């Protein structure tokens, strides 16, 4: 990953010349290295520009989904295909949020099947890669993971499909229904009376070592980065193109900083200087499940620069999740509400000018009824 970061920062990539046996036949040294680094990531070409010039290479040449055949009729041979052959997740225009030359689009990650969230992508990819690498073995038949529910449900699904067991560690602040949902998926749930911090994850790592369990560790696992580079960002790009715009900015929440790092990394390079990246975090001391503050430490942060980090209060996030349901008829989670609240702040601060904006909604709202109830009890309907 370090080599990749260095190469991506330094190089201006042109399309390598390839012979009919798929060998690179003409390239300068550094670009050959970069080319192979990207090949390892399964992404043949990601154009990187060190100048102000936008590199125009059609996504078809970059290879949308190098290795997955999409499935227009949506008939699936198993529940794994239901995940990855059901992509792309929808991009939908939110007319209630759009106005005066500002068009707002939402990428609905709640359409992923296992946990109704973006974390299905990493659960599937981290687990699949660990099978390929021989880490999922007969003598190691249990996985441990710290989760705020979504990654846990995705890994629980992967464990169920592969006849594996899972033990998931949840912090005290997470809604009660998560225990039930995870148990329905066959998982052992451990509640810890603390918040999800680096120390929390270290404890899970120690338990996993002690018990010879698989710990995929979403906070450190580079496949969390890779899966978004291979799929998520390309989906967003092709959908924006289909809708006839490039995004003036992309707005999203940060947890492990998996998806927003890659979105920043890809769009900043591909549309040099054109796409801004705004990240949403909870106000200090507020709990918005799935997202956390940037200073709590995130592995891939050094790979990218973001334009703004916006603080959102918990109640603002819940209010916006309710608001979007009232106006657009979609149920989204609290971090999606936080993304909307953050976007509104950017509008109010005059940072948002005319154009098209993409908001990433990480999950569906079904897990959060306890939070909605609590909000209604406090403020009324
Ligand atoms: N929103 C929700 C609901 C999540 O569950 C998560 C991650 O767990 C995020 C946002 C943040 O995503 P990432 O870990 O890619 O930063």
Image: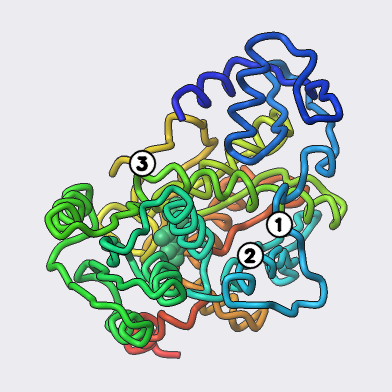
The crowding category of the residue bearing disc 3, from other C-alpha atoms within 10 Å (few below 14, some 14 to 19, many at least 20), is: some
Quarter holding the C terminus is: bottom left
Q: Earlier in the sequence, mark 2 or mark 3?
A: 2
Report if the CB atoms under discs 2 and 3 are less than 8 Å apart: no
138, 141: nearer the viewer? 138
In-image side of 175 versus 236 (left or right): left
Q: Give the distance between the C-alpha atoms of the residues marked 2 and 1, in whole angstroms.
A: 8 Å
Location of residue 19 in the rendering, given as x and y in whole percent from the top left corner: 84, 24
Q: Nearer the viewer, residue 355 or 50?
A: 50
What residue is disc 2 on?
84
Q: Residue at x 29, y 55 (%)?
A: 215
Q: Is residue 318 shown to the viewer in this render? A: yes
Residue at image position (74%, 33%) is: 271
Q: Does the residue tagged 3 have its C-beta within 8 Å of any atom of ligand 1?
A: yes
* Label 1 crowd (10 A; few <14 / some 14-19 / many >=20): few
Query: Seen in the image, is 35 located left or right of residue 219?
Result: right
Disc 2, disc 1: CB below 8 Å?
yes
Whole-percent x and y of residue 142? 28, 66
Disc 1: which residue: 68
- Distance from disc 3 to disc 1, alpha carbons, whole Å, reads 29 Å
Q: Is residue 116 above or below residue 374?
A: above
Secondary element at tag 2: helix
Cα distance, mark 2 to mark 3? 26 Å
Residue farthest top in this picture:
28
Q: Is residue 152 left or right of residue 173?
A: right
Q: Which residue is mark 3?
A: 298
Q: Does mark 1's beta carbon lie closer than 8 Å to ligand 1?
A: no
In this view, 34 is above or below 155: above
């Amino acid at each position: 990953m370090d080599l990749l970061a260095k190469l991506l920062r330094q190089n201006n990539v042109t399309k390598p010349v390839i012979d009919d046996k798929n060998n690179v036949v003409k390239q300068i040294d550094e670009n050959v290295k970069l080319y192979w680094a990207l090949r390892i990531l399964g992404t043949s070409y990601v154009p990187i520009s060190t100048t102000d010039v936008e590199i125009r290479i059609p996504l078809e040449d970059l290879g949308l989904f190098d290795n997955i055949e999409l499935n227009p009729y949506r008939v699936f041979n198993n529940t794994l295909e239901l995940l990855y052959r059901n992509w792309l997740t929808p991009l939908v225009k939110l007319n209630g949020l759009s106005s005066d030359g500002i068009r707002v689009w939402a990428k609905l990650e709640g359409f992923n099947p296992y946990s109704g969230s973006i974390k299905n992508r990493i659960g599937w990819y981290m687990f699949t890669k660990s099978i390929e690498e021989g880490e999922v073995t007969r003598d190691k038949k249990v996985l441990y993971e710290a989760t705020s529910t979504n990654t846990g449900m995705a890994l629980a699904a992967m464990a169920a499909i592969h006849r594996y067991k899972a033990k998931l560690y949840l912090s005290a602040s997470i809604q009660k229904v998560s225990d039930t949902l995870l148990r329905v998926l066959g998982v052992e749930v451990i509640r810890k009376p603390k918040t999800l911090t680096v120390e929390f994850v270290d404890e899970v790592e120690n338990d996993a070592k002690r018990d010879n369990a698989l710990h995929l560790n979403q906070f450190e696992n580079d496949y969390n980065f890779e899966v978004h580079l291979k799929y998520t960002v390309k989906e967003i790009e092709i959908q924006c193109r289909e809708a006839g715009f490039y995004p003036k900015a992309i707005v999203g929440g940060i947890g492990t900083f998996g998806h927003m790092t890659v979105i920043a990394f890809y769009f900043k390079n591909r549309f040099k200087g054109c796409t801004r990246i705004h990240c949403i975090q909870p106000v200090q001391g507020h709990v918005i499940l799935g997202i956390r503050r940037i200073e709590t430490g995130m592995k891939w942060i050094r790979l990218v620069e973001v334009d703004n980090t916006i603080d959102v209060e918990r109640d603002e996030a819940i209010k916006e999740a309710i608001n979007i349901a009232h106006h657009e008829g979609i149920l989204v989670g609290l971090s999606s509400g936080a993304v909307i609240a953050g976007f509104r702040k950017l509008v109010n601060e005059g940072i948002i000018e005319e154009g098209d904006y993409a908001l990433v909604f990480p999950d569906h709202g079904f897990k959060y009824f306890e939070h909605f109830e609590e909000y209604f009890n406090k403020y009324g309907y």
